[in-house]
Amino acid sequence: MNSAVPDRLPVALDRAKFSDPNHTLDNQPRAFVGLKNLDTLWFNTGTVCNLACTNCYMGSSPSNDRLAFMRAGEVSAILAELQADWRVQEIGFTGGEPYMNPDFLAILADALGRGYRVLVLTNAMRPMMKMADGLLALRREHGDRLCLRVSMDHYAPDLHELERGRHSWERMLTGLTWLAGYGFNINIAGRTLSGEDEDALRQGYGQLFAANGIPVDAGDPAALVLFPEMDEDLDVPEISAACWDILNVSPGAMMCATSRMVVKHKGDTDLTVMPCTLLPYDQRFKMGSSLASAKTAVPLNHPHCARFCVLGGGSCSAG
């Protein structure tokens, strides 16, 4: 065998897979996940972003408006429903870049003012820094209940910029060190794109954090979250009901067992509840316009369900 040729080349996904919500391609009963408890409610504040990252699973960019900006009043109505009927611990905000939404500070203040822990996924660049004064005010009032998770695709600047573009490293690090300097509760979203093992990745991130005064424990999986890579065009096994025992994985450990996401699709007047942060567009997963519909069990009928959650062990929530 020629050693220069990889043992296994990437295989394209058979599009006949993940098409039947009830059965896999080989006619096995598909795995479903019921809602155990709604611990985290996510809001996608809009898909517009200041960056156009190479492998963004959302396809977010300055021109992507497939998910419209949510208005503060719309979010407030969902939060009121949440307080009345659910025991949620955490509110998460993602995008796009949440700080591109002109209502975002008001939205943050509303969620924090209701007593929730709040997690914001951000690239910590100029859109965030434009709201610095408002963020400082929220930090003074609510302390560590506001957590910002900063995206850092790798600890090496060139690999980070390979994904996010030129000058993105310096601007991200400026925002991150500003957050650290003012005592914000921060953690980091890393990627496994380099192919290094987890210990090597955590060591590299840890050295970077120490050199820049970033108070994040790289050895703590909740403080440095390393996400598996996702490509819905590459082959991945479907998850049948039998897989729970075969893989020794619990359906209760899946993200959709404890979370939902609220989005606003472009052109819609109403908000829509989706099972999780990974499936913002797929119309097959729409659950309705209110949280009352969120209890429906979710078929694991998408490549992300298999690759990210069941096989990759990934979750976007803080816990």
Image: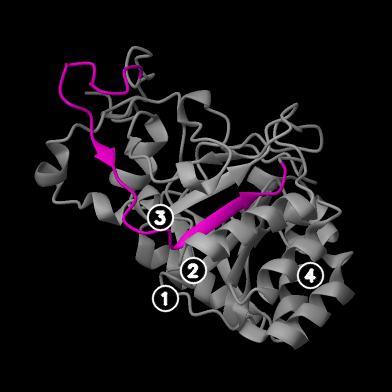
Furthest residue to the top?
16
* Side of 96 where 310 appears, left or right: left
**Residue 156 in sight in this render:** no
**Quadrant for the C terminus in the image:** bottom left
Structural crowding at the residue carrying mark 1, measured as other residues with C-alpha within 10 Å and reported as few (<14), some (14–19) or many (≥20): few
Disc 1 versus disc 2: distance between alpha carbons? 6 Å
Q: Are marks 1 and 3 in contact (CB under 8 Å)?
A: no
Q: Position of residue 313 (x, y in %)?
A: 33, 52
Secondary structure at numbered mark 4: helix
**Rendered image quadrant of residue 212:** bottom right
**Quadrant for the N terminus in the image:** top left
Q: Give the vertical position of 296 relative to 130 (above or below).
A: above
Q: Are marks 1 and 2 in contact (CB under 8 Å)?
A: yes
Q: Type of residue at label 1?
A: Asp
Q: Which residue is mark 1?
A: 220
Residue 196: give its label. 3
Residue 174: give its label. 4
Q: How is the image coloured?
A: one colour
Q: Is residue 28 magenta?
A: yes
* Side of 290 where 311 appears, left or right: left
Q: Tell me the residue at 65%/73% (across/down).
A: 114
Q: Type of residue at label 3?
A: Glu
Residue span colored magenta: 19-46
Structural crowding at the residue carrying mark 4, measured as other residues with C-alpha within 10 Å and reported as few (<14), some (14–19) or many (≥20): some
